[in-house]
Image (cartoon, helix red, strand yellow):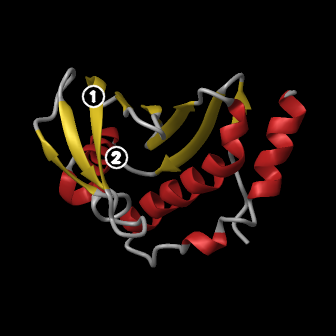
Amino acid sequence: MTTPTGRLDGNDLVLTRRFHAPIEDVWTSLTASDSTARWYGSWTGTPGTGNTIAVKLLFEQGAPESNAHIDACEPPRRLALSTTGEWGVRIEVTLTHQAGVTELRFVHHLNDRELARDMGPGWEYYLDNLVAARAGTTLPTFDQYYPSMKPYYSGLVDAAG
């Protein structure tokens, strides 16, 4: 079983991953549609702060599309996106680089920390997809993450009160 890595900081679900790669290379994996299609989904539209893009969630059943507003795009360090609707999401990715290692800090700003019980395993899955896609290895399957990681994330929620 894959070991969960996330933590809660208030209502923020925080996960990190490290890459032995230049920050610009990791940034491309997060922002170029042909790269994001390998681990999350493709997108169309005009990139840049204030714009809206259409994201096709290629690893979800039926590959649904969702619009995402680009709240911030500060290459190669910070990307913030938000969606509206029933599953309105606000996420932020920050990259830092030191001594040949780029650290990705992913934050899902939850409206209700209870959502971490289900969202945590999903983001673990997607970030491990990113790791595998960058390494050229086989992508994991979602059933390696859910429901097996739900108790870990439920424990975080319960401990946070």
Q: Disc 1 residue type? A: Ile
Q: Is residue 56 above or below residue 148?
A: above
Q: Disc 2 residue type? A: Val
- Number of marks drawn: 2
Q: Which residue is mark 2?
A: 26
Q: Residues within 10 Å of mark 2 (few under 14, many from 20)?
A: many
| Residue at mark 2 to residue at mark 1: CA–CA distance | 18 Å
Residues at discs 2 and 1 in contact (Cβ within 8 Å):
no
Which residue: 67% across, 25% down?
11
Q: Is residue 140 above or below residue 149?
A: below
Nearer to us: label 2 or label 1 = 1
Q: Where does the image place residue 72, in percent across and percent down from the top left?
A: 30, 22
Q: Please, which residue is most extreme toward the left here? A: 46
**Helix, strand, or loop for circle 2?**
helix
Which residue: 64% across, 55% down?
121
Q: Please, which residue is most extreme toward the bottom here? A: 138
Q: Where does the image place residue 153, in percent across and percent down from the top left?
A: 76, 47
Q: Residues within 10 Å of mark 1 (few under 14, many from 20)?
A: some
Q: Considering only order in the chain, which callout, 1 or 2, is on the residue closer to the N terminus?
A: 2
Q: Which residue is mark 1?
A: 70
**Helix, strand, or loop for circle 1?**
strand
Taking depth in this image into account, of 145 and 105 the one nearest to the observer is: 145
Q: Where does the image place residue 3, in percent across and percent down from the top left?
A: 73, 60
Question: Which quadrant of the figure contains the N terminus?
Answer: bottom right
Q: Is residue 27 above or below residue 41?
A: above
Q: Where does the image place residue 90, in percent across and percent down from the top left?
A: 46, 30
* Image quarter of residue 23: top left
